[in-house]
Image (cartoon, rainbow, N blue to C red):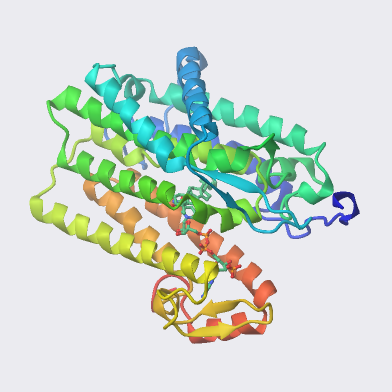
Amino acid sequence: MADKIKTTRTKELEFGGSIGALLMLIFLPGTVLYLLLTCNTADASVFQVPGPLPPLETLWNPFALTLLLGWMSLQAVLYMLPMGTIAEGITLRDNSRLRYKINAFYAFLVSAVLAGVAVTLRVPLSYVYDHFLEFAVASGIISLALSIFLYIKSLAAPESALAPGGNSGNPLYDFFIGHELNPRIGSFDLKYFCELRPGLIGWCLINLCFLMKDIELRGSASLSMILVCGFQGLYVMDALWHEEAILTTMDIVHDGFGFMLAFGDLCWVPFTYSLQAYFLVRHPQELSTLAAIGIVLLNAVGYIIFRGANSQKNAFRRNPSDPSVTGLETIPTATGKKLLVSGWWGLVRHPNYLGDLIMALAWSLPCGLGHILPYFYVIYFTGLLIHREARDEHQCLKKYGLAWQEYCKRVPYRIFPYIY
Ligand SMILES: NC(=O)C1=CN([C@@H]2O[C@H](COP(=O)(O)OP(=O)(O)OC[C@H]3O[C@@H](n4cnc5c(N)ncnc54)[C@H](OP(=O)(O)O)[C@@H]3O)[C@@H](O)[C@H]2O)C=CC1
Ligand SMILES: CC(C)CCC[C@@H](C)[C@H]1CC=C2C3=C(CC[C@@]21C)[C@@]1(C)CC[C@H](O)C(C)(C)[C@@H]1CC3
């Protein structure tokens, strides 16, 4: 059956095609190094001319590499343990449906217990802060090695297993975007595993290490540090609790697994999303109780919109007669599926992005208003979500045609009400 599926070459190349992909291969690791080096300077200013790269031998730390490989192995073992449930992914081009293990939240709990034991036994977790750049470099090396492995593996994959967006025929582009859709070793799904576990749970562990460094330096963790770690911990736990929901995201359904996602999951997320906590260790900030209450409220508003919108759509897609969504107005489409046009999805066309961006702002505000660096996440994330929204809009117009145009007329704003 798989052999009969016709080759469909990717025609619309993203990120500026192969030249863009080449530039991203340099730009993404370069950005991680730049952010961490700048954060480590006395004034953490993005307006200063970047200093020279430290000598290469100071960036290479085999112990950091070993620890990261140990961490990934621990997460792989937790993924494979017979705990949790099984869910089916969407129907693939060859009409099959892959089965996925749902146990990421358990993996988080076990990891949290192990981290608690490490704190109790006074394991020097602040080592991660002291050698953070070396950890980031080691993680970049792991991501590159994984991407090379994935590309070589994809050359032997049947046509039906290739990603619709990563089969351009240009090796550089396909290597970057990802050639194979759901690369697996036996039942071990490499993309699904990397998307939620080593990097996302690792992000929380890194934040904990920074919090311990804060305690080591000042005797107690600052309120700003507690807020940043608390907000981001909540975000990660939410993602793991709703693990099944990522089976319908474009990363799993459409994008292949190549350098972009491997580097994104294993290096970009843990080493740039933790920038606020990294910043706070060297640049502590005073926060008044009133400001802290305001920031907590802002994060709560963002979370309510983010979770409300995602859960509403997931409930509706799983079962349109679910009591939580039956009162909502919908538009029928020629595919038989309907589009929500009231509730969160009647406010803007991507309410979940709006909530996510509000939370992103709340994660940076505890770092004060004196530096741009800790606002990197909000700035990058706005760009990422605007680009993602455009990609999704394009796919939805292709899928739903006139019904999508009608939805756009009824809900004219994309992410920010009355602005965009
Ligand atoms: N922290 C981070 O770095 C990142 C976080 N995210 C977050 O991940 C989450 C998932 O985002 P993402 O995967 O981009 O996409 P969405 O969860 O927003 O899904 C988009 C899909 O939803 C369906 N849809 C769109 N409009 C409607 C409607 N009115 N009614 C019913 N269904 C509709 C369409 O699919 P269909 O009709 O086929 O069901 C569309 O393709 C978001 O909360 C986002 O903020 C994303 C990227 C990075
Ligand atoms: C570095 C590149 C320019 C871009 C890489 C993008 C990736 C970092 C992101 C693509 C989609 C993601 C998602 C999450 C994390 C970031 C990446 C991998 C997500 C797991 C974060 C937690 C959320 O609750 C989620 C909805 C589960 C997210 C899914 C998409």
Q: How many marks?
A: 0
Q: Which one is nearer the viewer's eye here, 158 or 366?
A: 158
Q: Which one is nearer the viewer's eye here, 241 or 70?
A: 241
Quadrant placement of the C terminus: bottom left
Asked if 268 appears above or below 413 in the picture, the reply is above
Q: Which one is nearer the viewer's eye here, 26 or 385?
A: 385
- Residue 216 horizontal side relative to residue 118, left or right: left
Asked if 15 appears above or below 282 in the picture, the reply is below
- Residue 389 horizontal side relative to residue 257, left or right: left
- Residue 128 horizontal side relative to residue 66, left or right: left
Residue 220 visible in rendering:
yes
Locate residue 27: give its quadrant.
top right
In the image, residue 262 lies at what x, y percent? Answer: 59, 38
Q: What is the residue that sits farthest to the left in this orientation?
A: 289
Q: What is the residue that sits farthest to the right in this orientation?
A: 4
Residue 31 visible in rendering:
no
**Residue occupying the point 22% across, 21% down:** 120
Asked if 134 appears above or below 251 in the picture, the reply is above
Locate residue 247: give its quadrant.
bottom right
**Residue occupying the point 62% across, 76% down:** 337
**Residue occupying the point 33% across, 45% down:** 232
In the image, residue 418 lies at what x, y percent? Answer: 39, 79
In the image, residue 9 lies at what x, y percent? Answer: 82, 55
- Residue 113 horizontal side relative to residue 348, left or right: left
**Residue occupying the point 9% across, 51% down:** 289
